[in-house]
Image (cartoon, grey):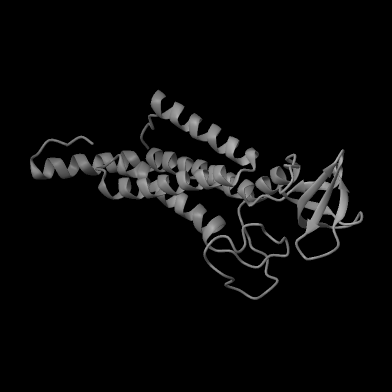
Amino acid sequence: MSRFRFSIAGFFLVLTLVAFGLAATVSQSELAGSAAFTVFLGLLCLATAGAILRVLPERAFWLGFALFGWTYWMCEFEVELPSSRGGVLRGIFFSGPISSPGQTRPGLVTSHLIQYLASNLAPSRTVGSKVMGQWRGGSYYSGTISEARGEEYLIIWDDGSSPQWTHTTQILPNSPSILVAGHSLCGGLFALIGGALAAILFGGVASERRATESQASGRPPTGA
């Protein structure tokens, strides 16, 4: 193993990105969700380039970051199986169903955490906001707020049912941006942990290999 070193500048950069990801998640803003997703995808592309172009042993961190990050991408963004949960991300990202109807998508533990967060956030209740409203004290369905009257809001249901005045306590968020930003944040942290583990576990081996190759060629080890 090698000792993984994390600079103060790197720490503050990670802290800034985490704060941005959290803010994008709770904002329920489509623009903020897209920005978080763009940053996550940009980091994966940068890590892939670093895994190819960086020299040993620094390559271990970037390779671990890229592998863990793309794995998270494949699990939570790229492949979406049909699910009885009715995931909000279905239909937004790329691939269609790859298995028989009714099969539950496995997902990572972060999926449950983000779903829990999304269900407990205070929904945006401005006119025009997409929400999940409780239909006549039963199940929740997707709709759009068209009018506000004190603590009640008139919801136009997406399935064409008659509009209904719904109390604020019967309204939940229905913003795909919450899941997009939340998974982008969790994916970035998952990739960072993977990069750190790769550097700790394999960075020393890579360093020894570089030193051995340098000795065999008669040249001093080169830096990053």
Instruction: Answer whether residue 110 is visible to the viewer in this image.
Output: no
- The image quadrant that residue 203 belongs to is top left
Q: Residue furthest top?
A: 8
Q: Is residue 109 left or right of residue 65?
A: right
Instruction: Answer whether residue 51 is visible to the viewer in this image.
Output: yes
- The image quadrant that residue 169 belongs to is top right
Above or below residue 139? Residue 193 is: above
Q: Residue furthest bottom?
A: 100
The residue sitting at 54% across, 57% down in the picture is 77
In what quadrant of the picture does the C terminus appear? Answer: top left
Q: Nearer the viewer, residue 189 or 218?
A: 189
Residue 99 lies, in percent from the top left, at 61, 74
The residue sitting at 58% across, 49% down in the picture is 180
In what quadrant of the picture does the N terminus appear? Answer: top left
Residue 7 lies, in percent from the top left, at 38, 26
Above or below residue 21? Residue 128 is: below
The residue sitting at 82% across, 43% down in the picture is 148
Q: Is residue 168 left or right of residue 219?
A: right
The residue sitting at 18% across, 42% down in the picture is 212
